[in-house]
Image: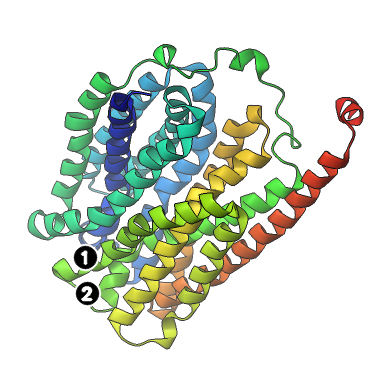
Amino acid sequence: MSNSRWLSVGGSLMVGLFVAYLDRINLSVGLPAVSRDLGFAGDQFGVVSSWVLTTFLIGYCLANVLGGILTRRYDPKTTVMWCVAIWSVSTVLTGLAGSVAVLLFCRLILGVTEGIYWPQQSRFAKGWFAPSELARANSLIQYYGQFLALAIGFMIMTPVYDALGWKMLFYITGGIGLVLILPLYAKCLRPESEAPYIDVNAEQERGRLTFKSLGGVPFLFLIFTYITQGMLFWGITLWIPLVMRSIGFTGWGQAIASSVPYLAAVILAIPMSMISDRTGKRVLIAALGMLIPGVLLILLPTVDSGIAKLALITVALGYYASSFTPNIWAIIQETVEPQAIGPASGIINGLGAGGGGTLAGFLVGLLYRSTGSYMAGFVALGTLVILGGISLLIYGRIAVGVSQRREATPPTQLAHS
């Protein structure tokens, strides 16, 4: 495949997801001033902040299924451009919010449109990249767009917020989508009908969606695992600017400290992906990517200095993201029947990122309200993600058993089963 497609398709979608994540995390940066201006600072902060931070995830959870449906009915270029336009306008309008109700509505629209957007990226990857290039293409489009935004986004937005205020933060991030991403997509993305690797027989080959086609019982363990990882990722991401402030980082120090864990994820992704590809032990590596970070988060109350706490959070998030995230989608694709991969991805991402993230946002916020410390919430996240790692190991044992039984079954019996 020509290098131009890596730039025009992969590169432009990576930039688009980068901006999408800026629109997701801008509220975490501006939350202290937003709470003061909209009247929920003080005793109400923990509960109301949990709602305003997680409303995005509620919409995101519900919209992933809708996004999966749209990938079957509409051209992905049209869909992503409408999504970017709507969520960018919604982000700009957030800067005009004069009440909590308006803020919640704008964040809900952001979640719905970004939830519809997410599955379209997989469709672009499948149509424009060869099967042997999909792992690298998905990393370029999704992993690096996401974690680069988190790695440098807090460093960019924190000084903007300090200098210009929270309203300008939303005007700028929303405006980038309208002024930069929409023209970029219009120029660089092409209709699906022109994609060189599109499966023209996909509609004819698509079978009926059943529990068995999703992977059966092992699929339930994957769902639970992904919910706990969603809690880990969003429980940290939604609150990390305030967490860094609470352990002694302010100004530029807060911005850099908030970004360091995601920078670690970007750096560690390359060697961890190489180890995974070389050994093929995807389930074990992904499970360790949850078990080890879980233990590190549980250890947070045992250290006193802000630097030590930052180090534990950095290693936990960086190791989790680089070990779990690159492997989980390959694991799903190995156990889910081809016609069910789209719906399965929507279910897992919706329940995991949306549902798990929503639960985590409230968990950290409510524990902060009751204890006065964010560390209690992070310890709870660590405990849950350990359970998720155990669930993934159980999944691996069950999936291996199912695979062995299938291999031992004569082809004639499989044909009639």
Category of crowding for the residue at label 2, using alpha-carbon neighbours closer than 10 angstroms: few (below 14), some (14–19), many (at least 20) = many
Residue 239, image quadrant? bottom left
Residue located beneath label 2 in the image: 249
Disc 1 is placed on an element classified as helix
Residue 47 in view, yes or no: no
Residue located at (28% from left, 31% from top): 12
Disc 2 is placed on an element classified as loop
Place of residue 349 in the rendered image (x, y in percent of width and height, measured from the top left): 53, 44
Residue located at (42% from left, 80% from top): 300
Place of residue 399 in the rendered image (x, y in percent of width and height, measured from the top left): 74, 49
Place of residue 411 in the rendered image (x, y in percent of width and height, measured from the top left): 87, 29
Q: Amino acid at mark 1?
A: Ile
Q: Please, which residue is most extreme toward the left here?
A: 163
Q: Is residue 376 above or below residue 413?
A: below
- Position of 211 with respect to 157 (left or right) is right
Q: Is residue 400 above or below residue 191?
A: below
- How far apart are the alpha carbons under marks 2 and 1? 9 Å
Q: Amino acid at mark 2?
A: Phe
- Position of 123 with respect to 152 (left or right) is right
Q: Please, which residue is most extreme toward the front here?
A: 278
Colour pattern of the rendering:
rainbow
Residue 316 in view, yes or no: yes
The residue lying toward the viewer, choosing from 365 and 234, is 234
Q: Are marks 2 and 1 in contact (CB under 8 Å)?
A: yes
Residue located beneath label 1 in the image: 256
Place of residue 65 in the rendered image (x, y in percent of width and height, measured from the top left): 55, 34
Foreground mark, 2 or 1? 1
Category of crowding for the residue at label 1, using alpha-carbon neighbours closer than 10 angstroms: few (below 14), some (14–19), many (at least 20) = many
User: Which numbered disc covers residue 48?
Assistant: none
Check the picture and name the quadrant holding the C terminus: top right
Residue located at (46% from left, 22% from top): 127
- Position of 132 with respect to 30 (left or right) is right
